[in-house]
Each structure stands twice: as C-alpha cells, then as structure tokens.
Amino acid sequence: MEILFASGSTDVNKTCILLYKTYFSRLVRFANIYVCSSEDAENIVQDLFLHLWENKDKLSAIRKPDSFLFSSVKNRCIDFLRSQIASGERHSLSTVEQQEYLLKLYSIQMLDETQL
C-alpha cells in the first residue's frame, strides 16, 4: 500500500477504492473497541472515508496510510466519546454510563499510535 502512495499513482479513484476495501472492516473493528457500538463505529469510519473522498486530491501527501487511517479513527473516536460525555451531562446519563465513557476516553487517549 505504501508503494502505491510513494509512487504518486495518478489514479486517485482506484487508490480510494483500494483503501476502502483494504481498511474498512479493520478500522470498524478498531473503532468498535472504544465506542462499543458497531453502528457508531461504522459511522465513524464511513465519515472518515467520506472525508478522504472529498479530499482525494490530497491523498498523495499520505506516506503511511496504515498509521494515518488508524490515527484518524482514533481521533474521531475521541471526539465521539467527548460528545457522548457532553450530551450525557445535558441528558442525564447515569453515573455508571458517565464513568464508562470517561474510562473509554482515557484508554483511547493513552493509546500509543506507534503500536498500531
């Protein structure tokens, strides 16, 4: 995969499709570890791929797609968990639910991206 990016492949559409086919299910499983909802995990990853598609002209700048994609999903999971915590404060989540979201947020923030 890195060779495809390093070579500066001109077929950006093929690159996007290849990224999707190669990484989608792995990224959904990764996100699901933290958000504990397959629907939310899938939405997070779909949003990432939509963002990539909308900015496909910048794909050639990505040197390590593996690291880039997993880091992007990690950051989106963090954003998701923060929004869940904030909405929970407004919509009165139970104390246990609130603590669970905080623990998930802490664990993903402590994730060492070099270990991905």
Image (cartoon, rainbow, N blue to C red):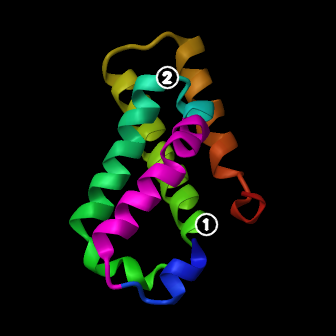
Q: Main secondary structure of the magenta part?
A: helix
Q: Which of the pair 80/24 is nearer the observer?
A: 24
Q: Is residue 57 visible?
A: yes
**Tag 1 residue:** 67
**Tag 2 residue:** 37
Task: Please state, as top left, top right, bottom left or bottom right, where the C terminus lies in the image.
Answer: bottom right
Q: Residue furthest right?
A: 115
Would residue 77 appear left or right of 84 to someone viewing this image? right
Count of marks overlaid on the render? 2
Q: Quadrant of residue 108?
A: top right
Q: Is residue 44 magenta?
A: no
- Mark 1 touches mark 2? (CB < 8 Å): no
What is the span of residues highlighted in magenta in the rendered image?
10-31
Q: Amino acid at mark 1?
A: Ser
Q: Amino acid at mark 2?
A: Ser
Q: Quadrant of residue 67?
A: bottom right
- The residue positioned 78% from the left and 59% from the top of the image is 115
Location of residue 58 with respect to 23 vertically, above or below: below
Going from N to C along the chain, the mark reached first, 1 or 2, is 2
Rendering coords of residue 37 (x, y %): 49, 22
Location of residue 99 with respect to 10 vertically, above or below: above
